[in-house]
Image: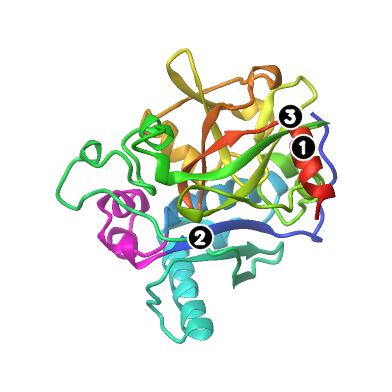
Amino acid sequence: MDSPPTSDGFDIISSIRSDAILLYSWQNTWVNAEISGTAARSPAQFYMLSYHLDRMLNAAEEFGWDTSPLEGPKAFAELLEKLHDHLEREHNDRNHAAPLKLRIALSANGKFTITSDGPHPGPATIEGPLRLIGDNPISQLYPGSLSSVADPILGAAYLRWRVFVSPNKVTPTKFTMHKTSNRGVYDEALAPAQPLGLGLNNHKLQTEVLIVNDSEEVMEGCKCTPYFLRDNEWITPKGSCGGNFGTTRRWAVEKGLCKLGVVMFNSVKCGEIIVLSNGARGFQSGIVEPWKSLLEDDTKQ
């Protein structure tokens, strides 16, 4: 697997949801409490913050950067403080309640930069505070199952994506296996993906493009981690396929909602409903459409 030389000309990044509803999510508190320290054990309004730290730490190790800004309870507490500082500076409230997508960027010299990055993630639901998560199966941020998200009736409200599979093959590198500001592969795949369709209840459908490696295995989406129903099991591409190991994907695998595996390019069929997840929107569903329809839409703009 060829890898471009690393340099200081890029940032390690992660996009995270800020949302006051997460203060009432016991699942979110448990995820963060995997890091020791008082700050991590307290409810936080940032979605899977400890997992974002971990993914950035793994990237820093891969690129040979100083990892101290990302390690341990002190790093968690300091990043938490920086996120609240951003909310106060940009939104005049350290505990800004409305959902936001924040972009965390770490440079090679150890400096964090936090911005409010669109598009707006929209409202979401969490598990009931006093119930097992399985009792609230269509929670968008911490679902009880992926089938509930993809269900055409129960999960219909979470159909948010038109999904296309790029016919162009991508050679995996460190910059596909870790999330950085070096996004050329993804920008190229998304270039024709500007149009928005109109979904249920007049919700605009976002456009997602899945990228495929040289072996014709699905790697990941440009914006989300994909999950595919195969032989009555949900499968998400394993690390050797070349995509990055996202925060929501990690949670879904650890909770047994899906398994790591290989999904071949030619097995993804038009009309198929898949699940998509990321650190800003949680878990939603999408419907696969033919690539040529995306190009046809683009020519009409």
The answer to whether the residue labelled 1 contacts the one labelled 2, judged by CB atoms less than 8 Å apart, is no
Residue 264, percent from left and from top: 67, 19
Q: How crowded is mark 1: few (under 14 residues within 10 Å), some or many (20 or more)?
A: some
The residue beneath circle 3 is 212
Residue 28, percent from left and from top: 33, 53
Q: Distance between the residues labelled 3 and 1?
A: 13 Å
Q: Nearer the viewer, residue 181 or 217?
A: 217
Q: Look at the picture and state if 210 lies above or below 127.
A: above
Q: How crowded is mark 3: few (under 14 residues within 10 Å), some or many (20 or more)?
A: many
Q: How crowded is mark 2: few (under 14 residues within 10 Å), some or many (20 or more)?
A: many
Pointer 1 or 2: first along the chain: 2
- Give the image quarter of residue 287: top right
The residue beneath circle 1 is 173
Residue at image position (30%, 55%) is 29
Residue at image position (39%, 29%) is 147
As helix, strand or loop, the secondary structure at mark 3 comes to strand
Q: Distance between the residues labelled 1 and 2?
A: 29 Å
Pointer 3 or 1: first along the chain: 1
> The residue under label 2 is which amino acid type?
Pro
Please check the rendered image and state whether residue 94 is part of the magenta-colored stretch, yes or no: no
Q: Distance between the residues labelled 2 and 3?
A: 26 Å
The residue beneath circle 2 is 121
Q: Look at the picture and state if 97 lies above or below 175.
A: below
Please check the rendered image and state whether residue 36 is part of the magenta-colored stretch, yes or no: yes
Pointer 2 or 3: first along the chain: 2
Residue 292, percent from left and from top: 79, 34
Q: Give the range drawn in magenta.
A: 19-46
